[in-house]
Amino acid sequence: MSVNRDIYRAVHERKWLSVEYLNGQGRTTRYWVGVKDIDPRQRTLRVRGMHLGSYTVKDLTIRVDGIESSSLIDESYFPTPPELIERIDRDEDRFSSIFGTVPNLNVLNYLADCSRLNVAPATKEFSLIKRVDEDSFARGALCLDKEQFAAVVKRAQDRARYPHKGFRAKFEQLALNVLSVRGAGGLYVIAYRQLRLDPERRTLVIGHNTILCREFVVRNGKAFERQSIRRYLGEEDLHLLSSFDENRERIKDLMAKRISAPRLVDDVPYLLIITRDATVDLQREYDGIYAMYERGEPTVPIKAFFGDLTKRPVRRREFPLILLDQHINMDQLTATHQALKYPVTYVQGPPGTGKTTTIVNILVNALYNERTVLFASFNNHPVDGVFKSLESYSWNGKVLPLPVIRLGNNAVMIQALERMRTLYELVKDESVTPDRMMELSRIDGKLRAKDLSDLLKEYEENLDLQERKECIEKLAKDADDFFFKLELQSVQLELVRKRLKRVEPAEKTLERALKLMDRDQESLLRQLFCLSVRRIKRLGEPRVDELREIVFSTQADDERVTAFNHYLSDTDNLKKFLRIFPIVATTCISAHKLGQPVPSFDMVVIDEASQCDSACALVPIVRGQNLTLVGDPAQLSPVVVIDGTDNATLRRTYNIPDEYDFIENSAYKTFLACDSVSNEILLHEHYRCDEKIIGFNNRKYYNGKLSVKSGRNSPGALSYYNVEGDVSREKNVAPAEAAAIVDYVRKNCDKQIGIITPFARQREYLLSSLSAQGFDDVPCGTVHAFQGDEKDVILFSLALTDRTTPATYAWVANNQELINVATSRARDELVIFSSDRELDRLHGSMKGPDDLCELVRYVKQNGKSLVTPRSVSSRALGIKPYSTKTEAAFLESLNHALSNVFTSQVRHVVHHEVPIAQVFDENVAQQQLFYSGRFDFVVYEVEPDGTEVPVLAIELDGKEHRANEAVMRRDEQKNEICRRHKLQLIRVENSYARRYAFIKSILEKFFSIRR
């Protein structure tokens, strides 16, 4: 499949492909080929081929199956015929024998390309070509002489044949400098234009777009320093970058004013190489996903990612649940149950709602139920937090040796080996023969698991009943047919209402659930101890001799790590490892070390999934059968450095819909947007902040759904300090405000205080001021430094001065991440420092919402002011994943179609998943036009002789039906075919699939009665 995927990328990215090809004489030859046409039936390519010995170029016809290996020439350019790209996009089914599922291929190629560009670049000299100026590219290309051409081809071919060493992959681009900052230590390339080699014309073609580098790795002697563009351009001027070409001279002048010798602004157009180091080769990782689809066995989480779930999978296995922490609420219990039972679960964890406790419960219960788990997060902090919680349990005066291993970089791997050795030494002499009481306890737990599962299912179905009730009411309101309306209102609606009356409060359900759970701490800890000992003692078995030798090796640490990484990279070895250590905790990127990209784990749990991009999240996700994503879209998003121009180009190249936009989405947001059927659970009980502090966040970002259980209610929870007369020589620095904060710290040094500010310069000034007064232990930073942290008191320094521009204020004023995270770190007191005069001035420049001004007003009025809710898309917060327009259009089409069906006054039957060939049996070829080759739901009219005639069909549409023009044109053809066959066709957007499932069951019930 990798060859086929390379061909697809070469066509769409307009690049040459390096191939090793087995010709008709049985000899392997090497070519660069540019694809001109594809014949999917014959599985052949018409190409322009360049022989790598003579550099001659000619037309060739080659077999796809004759290509033994391939590699994309990233730095090349080939003028792919636009009609070929259009044919592939238009006739996906026709090309599926070569490319597989094209929309999925598009998304994965896009994510892989975005990920390798989402790395701070560096530069190195390109010495093959000297003396270049702008006139050299007068016609958009630079001609190469014979020696230059040969050197450039050799370099590109070497990179194609040896793309990476070990786990690290280096991505390089030839570039033309547009604007840089040159210093004594190195070069920061602010802007460049990409150069691509056209082998046929022997030229370097200059790209149309200017690429920006908001971060760059600069060599400083032997060391490397990661720098931000903010060092050379003020916050208030960053907006100029969005129109760089128009503002180029102004940006250059502004930067020149900010820097001093020996640095200088450099706009000389010389050639250089832009390099990016990637930790993992995502194309290799995504091979596992392609392989799943080739076998016809994609896991449910992968299907959810691509929007292929139309109904929630049914899982009948019941899992007994245990409680090591007696303080649990219904949301946490439901999340634990669903994570174990269902293939996909989403958990939204607002600040202070016990997210870590929930994850620990999931992992402990997975261990108890003999499930293997890969626990991951994008950052180390949440992984370490959960791992330390699991390490903290003890029993009978000794450590509870839970078989949980933390993996990661080389230093973490050494710690893992030491932990494995320590655990084995600790338990190797333990005798763990289960006694009768333990066995009875486990048997009893399994017997009660069914009752517990039924109880939780009943509780979970409450939301389904509410949604079903809404569906019936909407259908009945618009129904034209009397009997249909009567059936809905008098039968189906009444039945749902009766069931809703039986639903008991959450507190009552929790009380009943706890009675069905094993809460005997002594017994549970003993069971977990025995289970852990049995697992860890397996390290002494002959089947894991290789692993045991690595664990107890006396070799140097780097050699042990190399051997350990090599061991875990083998899937069979990984399975042996998981028999001993069934729970593995690591970062998303480091998960690539764990075997091949195949589902080796029963479960994958990802924390802070709203801070992780989809490209990296798929690395652990592909390795599990089930998935639980835990996150909060209202808090921090992924840190993105890819240039917007690059992203826009890639989106156009691959026809990427909004749901997969790399810059705008996290893994959590993408999954929720693409999967409308799986449940999202809101952890709505808040335990951290004073009620007045979290009250603002609750109303602004959480639709008022949070229930405050912290027990904190201080009259001084909210404070505001007006600091006037702050005159600053530097932008985004408020000296008088900093002095007031230092004074506050001095007067309240007995309290646990944290300081948050939006600006890096104010942070540096505050740290210096605090240090001068001996307060080095007071943490101060931007919100990213405080994610997951909490303090008794949070001082929020807005740092608004007479030098703050409206553009800078606009960035702060509606920064949801900044405001939500900053305020929710405070347990007892939130204190805001700012200037009324500057706030009034800057608020007056705002033409739209101003969340920051609302927060200040809220604090000044002690939590009694009006808070305007922010629009959010979250099922957990009661916000539907589809628009009212989508629902209205569907219901109107459905009502019209049903009216036509009911006029016949004959019996009807319903069938599901009907192949197109059965509907259009006289023209089977037309089924290629239809998504997945089948209708989801078909209503048949039954004639007197028993013949079933299709009269109404419903088809589920994927995301590409709104983003891909070729697909939309194909939809028009489908509509015309259905009209000719007198078949009413209704399309359902994937975002409406959950609601549609209810409507479908309502219709099925009605038509079954009419039989």
Image (tube, grey):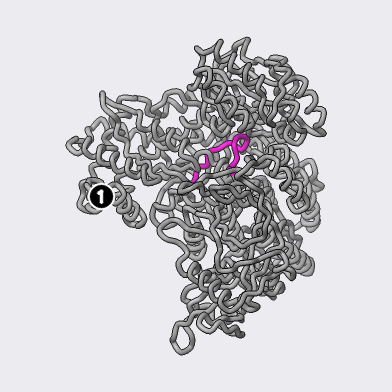
Position of residue 838 relative to residue 541, above or below, is above
Residue 809, horizontal then vertical, whole percent: 73, 32
The answer to which quarter of the image holds residue 425 is: top left
Q: Position of residue 845 (x, y in %)?
A: 81, 31
Q: Quadrant of the C terminus?
A: bottom right
Is residue 425 on the magenta stretch?
A: no
Question: As displayed, is residue 224 above or below residue 759?
Answer: below
Q: Nearer the viewer, residue 496 or 242?
A: 242
Mark 1 — residue?
550
Q: Name which quarter of the figure residue 87 lies in.
A: bottom right
Q: Nearer the viewer, residue 840 or 131?
A: 131
Q: Position of 398 compared to 671: left or right?
A: left
Taken as a whole, is the magenta stretch helix, strand or loop? loop
Q: Circle 1 sits in a helix, a strand or a loop, which is it?
A: helix
Relative depth, front residue between 426 and 137: 137
Q: What is the three-letter code of the residue carrying label 1?
A: Ile
**Residue 21 percent location from the top left of the image:** 49, 80
Question: Where is 155 relative to 520, above or below?
Answer: below
Horizontally, residue 891 falls left or right of residue 30, namely right
Asked if the magenta segment contains residue 634, the reply would be yes
Q: Is residue 655 visible?
A: yes
Labels in figure, total: 1
Answer left or right for 644 relative to 318: right
- Give the residue at the far front of this rendering: 261
The residue lying furthest to the bottom in this view is 25
* Segment colored magenta: 627-639
Residue sitting nearer the eye, 317 or 128 = 128
